Amino acid sequence: MKAKAKQPKALEVKYEELDQYDGAGDELTEAQEEKYAIHIGSFLISFSNLEHSLDVEIANLINDRSHYEGYTIIKDLEVSAKIELFYNLAFPMVNWAQKKKVLKSSQLASIRKQLETLSTLRNKIAHAKWQTLDTEGYVRVDTKTKKEDGMIKFRKLKITPTIMRQGIREMDVLAEKLPEFTESLWQ
C-alpha cells in the first residue's frame, strides 16, 4: 500500500507595513541560509519531477503511440495551462468510463487541486524574498497597497523547512499517482 500524503494546511500569513525606508534584507543569517537552501533546492527539484510526470501524462493522453504531438502542444505552456489541459483531456475519458466513474471523477478533481496547490506553493518558494526571512519563518512573498490609506504593506507567509518537506512528500506521491491514474482511464 502506498503512503498517502497529508493535505497541506493553509500557510500562515502576516503583514508588515513599509516604514519610510525598507530596511529589510539583513534578517537572513548564514545558519538560516544553509538550513533553508537545501530545502528550497529539494522542493524545486521535486516540483520539476512532478511537472515532468504531468508533461508525460499529457503527451500520453494526446497520443498513446508517440509523445511528439503532446510535447509539440505543451512546449510553451505555463504549468497552470498544463494542469488545465490535463484536466480537459482526462475529464471526457472519465465520463466515458464504464467502470468506477465516480471514483475516477473524484480522483481527477483531487489531482487537479493538488497540482494547483503545489504549483502555487512552488511559485511562492521560488519568488520569495528570502533575505527577509525572519526568525519565525515568515518571508515576504508579495507587496500590496492598502485600500484604506494607500500605504504599502508586505505580505509574508510562514514557509518552514517542515512545510517544504511535506510538499516534497506530497509531490513524490502525486508524481507516482499521475501515470497510474492516466493508465486507469484506458481501462
Image: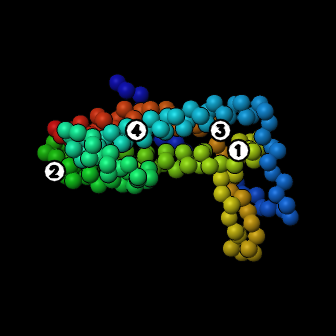
Quadrant position of residue 35: top right
Query: Which is more N-terminal, label 2 or label 1?
Result: 2
Image location (x, y in percent) of residue 159? 64, 43
Task: Report the amino acid beneath label 4.
Answer: His
Q: Image quadrant of residue 187? A: top left
Placement of 10 over or under 135, stated as above or below: below
Label 3, on which residue? 160
Comparing marks 1 and 2, which lies closer to the viewer? 1
- Which kind of residue does numbered mark 2 sit on? Trp
- Residue 80: mark in rendering: none
Q: Residues within 10 Å of mark 4 (few under 14, many from 20)?
A: few
C-alpha distance separating marks 3 and 2? 43 Å
State the residue at coordinates (41%, 52%). 76
Name the side, left or right, on which 87 lies relative to 24.
left
Mark 3 residue type: Thr
Measuring from the top left, give residue 97's x and y in whole percent. Answer: 16, 46
The reply to whether discs 1 and 2 touch (Cβ–Cβ < 8 Å) is no
Looking at the image, is mark 4 or mark 2 earlier in the sequence? 4
The quarter of the picture where the N terminus appears is top left
Judge the density around disc 1: few (<14), some (14-19), many (≥20) Cα neighbours within 10 Å.
many
Query: SS for tag 2?
Result: helix
- In the picture, the disc for residue 130 is 1
In the displayed structure image, the side of residue 21 where residue 64 appears, left or right: left
Secondary structure state at the residue bearing disc 1: helix
Q: Residues within 10 Å of mark 3 (few under 14, many from 20)?
A: some
Q: Which of disc 4 and disc 1 is earlier in sequence? A: 4
Provide residue 146's location: percent of width, then percent of height: 71, 70
Classify 20 as above or below 99: below
Q: Which residue is mark 2?
A: 96
Task: Decide which of tag 4 and tag 3 comes sooner along the chain.
Answer: 4
**What residue do we see at 38% from left, 48% from top?**
75
